[in-house]
């Protein structure tokens, strides 16, 4: 079942962050989600089955400087490895796309690392209609 994330999901979300490659303590996730839940431009959906979270997608509504348009930036997207290939990711992406349309956005973006373990994910994104058309740069400050 796809639904909006709730405060009680913090432990499951922390576990999913670990599956995404970002080990996270529940207390850290609780602090992050406290902030995220307070922002209207953020949305987090989870896939829950039998009381367990098997996937999540977290996004933000963004506004462009170069055009009079808005878009959704997917910040976190993960399905537990043992449940991949069962359509959970597609359902989460559909929920994200529906939210984007509700918000009047005309595009969704996401970043994914250039690490070898992400190659399968990159192929998945291409099959789902995303285009690899940008290079990201990061600077720690």
Image (cartoon, rainbow, N blue to C red):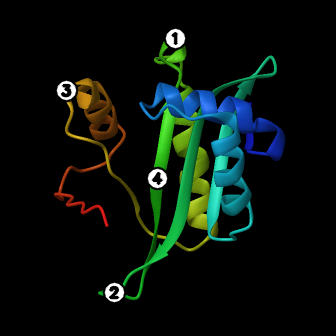
Q: Position of residue 5 (x, y in %)?
A: 74, 45
Asked whether residue 89 appears in the rendered view, the answer is: no
3D distance between C-alphas at marks 2 and 1: 41 Å
| Cα–Cα gap, marks 2 and 3 | 34 Å
Please tell me in which quadrant of the rendered image residue 69 appears. Answer: bottom left
Which labelled disc corresponds to residue 116? 3
x and y, in percent, of residue 18 in the image: 51, 28
Closer to the camera, 137 or 103?
A: 137
Figure label count: 4
> Which residue corresponds to the image point at 53% horizontal and 21% vertical from the top-left?
80
Q: Is residue 29 above or below residue 116?
A: below
Q: Of marks 2 and 3, which one's residue comes earlier in the chain?
A: 2
SS state under label 3: helix
Q: Is residue 71 above or below residue 127?
A: below
Q: Which mark is residue 67?
A: 2
Q: Nearer the viewer, residue 107 or 51?
A: 51
Q: Are marks 4 and 3 in contact (CB under 8 Å)?
A: no
- Identify the residue under disc 4: 75
Q: Along the polypeptide, which appears first: circle 2 or circle 1?
A: 2
Q: Which mark identifies residue 82?
A: 1
Q: Earlier in the sequence, mark 1 or mark 3?
A: 1
Residue contact between numbered discs 1 and 3, judged by CB atoms under 8 Å: no
Please tell me whether mark 1 sits on a helix, a strand or a loop: helix
Q: Name the element at disc 4.
A: strand
Q: CA distance from mark 4 to mark 2?
A: 21 Å
Residue at mark 1 to residue at mark 3: CA–CA distance: 19 Å
Label for residue 4? none
């Amino acid at each position: 079942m796809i639904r909006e994330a709730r405060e009680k999901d913090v432990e499951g979300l922390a576990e999913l962050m670990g599956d995404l490659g970002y080990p996270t303590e529940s207390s850290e996730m609780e602090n992050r989600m406290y902030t995220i839940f307070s922002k209207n431009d953020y949305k987090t959906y989870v896939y829950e089955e039998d009381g367990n979270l098997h996937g999540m997608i977290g996004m933000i509504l963004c506004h462009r400087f170069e055009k009079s348009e808005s878009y959704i930036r997917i910040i976190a997207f993960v399905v537990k490895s043992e449940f991949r290939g069962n359509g959970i990711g597609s359902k989460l992406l559909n929920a994200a796309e529906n939210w984007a349309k509700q918000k009047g956005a005309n595009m969704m973006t996401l970043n994914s690392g250039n690490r070898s373990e992400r190659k399968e994910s990159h192929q998945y994104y291409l099959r789902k209609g995303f285009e690899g058309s940008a290079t990201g740069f990061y600077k720690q400050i």
